[in-house]
Image (cartoon, rainbow, N blue to C red):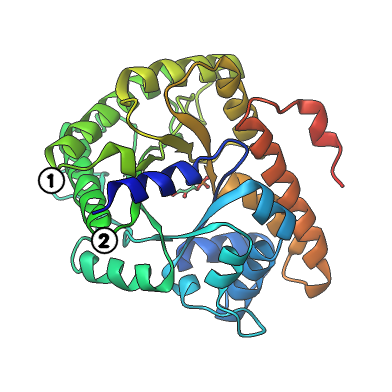
Amino acid sequence: MNLADLNKIALAMVTPGKGILAADESSGTIKKRFDAIGVESTEENRRDYREMLFRSTEAMSKYVSGVILYDETIWQNAKDGTPLVKLIEQAGSIPGIKVDEGTQALPACPGELVTVGLDKLAERLKKYYERGARFAKWRAVIDIGQGIPTTTAIHVNAHALARYAALCQAAQIVPIVEPEVLMDGGHDIDRCYEVTQQVLNTVFRELFMQRVALEGMVLKPNMVVSGKKSPKQASVQEVAEKTIRLLKACVPAAVPGIAFLSGGQSDEEATAHLDAMNRIGGLPWKLTFSYGRALQAAPQKAWSGKAGNVAAGQRAFTHRARMNALASKGEWETGLEKKVA
Ligand code: 13P
């Protein structure tokens, strides 16, 4: 492992004014997104859609530091035969790859999941590196509900995240470590704080136990927010303050950067929260975005599977990328949302 090079890539991924596009929806998830816009989820449509994003020159070169790809996409070529990975590289952005293989029910823990995909991971990482991937992603999912999460679920997921991260670094790939506490429930923000704290503390203990070099990774956490079904929705400022307070308590300063997931927040909420945190300032790590839905919902709608809508889709993508890029510097304002080109 060359830690200086891993650190350089990690820092590039969280460059202020840039963030990560999570375009790594599994076949099942992208089908759900396409169903919502009335597009059939064929291999060609998935390619056309992602090619549209990666050919958004302004967004990709100015605001997107890296792109997380799904296995199908990393091997796909654009319509003209250029590998999609090359389009990303040509725009000056870094290709990355989702390497977990989804979740399975966790035995003896009803309602809880464990992320799988460690078998043969070392071999897969080697092939992805040869194809151009310089970072990877593994997502653990922790749900909040009656009697959950259990310490068992938190521990096995943290253990797997650290196993994955150590294998990535051995393959000269920067691991994005993503322990996601879901925001689906009716819990309040303080319950989210408490669970996220337990999760992050367990994750960093496991990373230490498994000798992961913190300088060569990026953390992708949830923000501390109210559950979607909670009657008490916290304000933007409260989310920002509680998230920062928690991260300061749990994330060592050796970690170069934190790139949040959007997790089901609206486009504008995800931007406003990131902006408010960066306005607080005085942080030991860079704070940016690694959004899936909050970057793609608008372009998906504008595109809707029609070749004639590619320019409109790219405009919508560029707008959201720019808004979040500004938020990564604490320079976003709600008034800017009205000025869509
Ligand atoms: P969302 O921003 O839609 O939560 O997706 C980010 C991601 O990569 C989840 O694993």
Would you call the spot at circle 1 few (<14 residues within 10 Å), some (14-19), or many (20 or more)? Answer: few
**Rendered image quadrant of residue 98:** bottom left
Q: Which residue is drawn at 22% across and 41% down?
A: 158
- For the residue pair 333 and 59, the one nearer the viewer reads as 59
Would you call the spot at circle 2 few (<14 residues within 10 Å), some (14-19), or many (20 or more)? Answer: many
The answer to whether residue 279 is above or below residue 72 is above
- The extreme bottom residue here reads 81
Mark 1 C-beta to ligand 1 under 8 Å = no
N-terminal-most mark, 2 or 1:
1
Residue 108: numbered disc: 1
Q: Provide the residue designation for mark 2.
A: 171
Q: In this view, does 155 lie to the left or right of 81?
A: left
Secondary structure, mark 2, is: loop
- For the residue pair 28 and 140, the one nearer the viewer reads as 140
Q: Is residue 315 left or right of residue 105?
A: right
Q: Which residue is drawn at 74% across and 54% down?
A: 58
Q: Position of residue 196 (x, y in %)?
A: 34, 27
Q: Distance between the residues labelled 2 and 1?
A: 34 Å
Q: In this view, does 307 lie to the left or right of 247?
A: right
Q: Give the residue type at disc 1.
A: Ala
Which quarter of the rendering shows the N terminus? bottom left
Q: Which residue is drawn at 23% across and 65% down?
A: 121
Q: Give the residue type at disc 2.
A: Ala
Mark 2 C-beta to ligand 1 under 8 Å = no
Q: Position of residue 271 (x, y in %)?
A: 64, 33
Secondary structure, mark 1, is: loop
Q: In this view, does 77 lie to the left or right of 140?
A: right
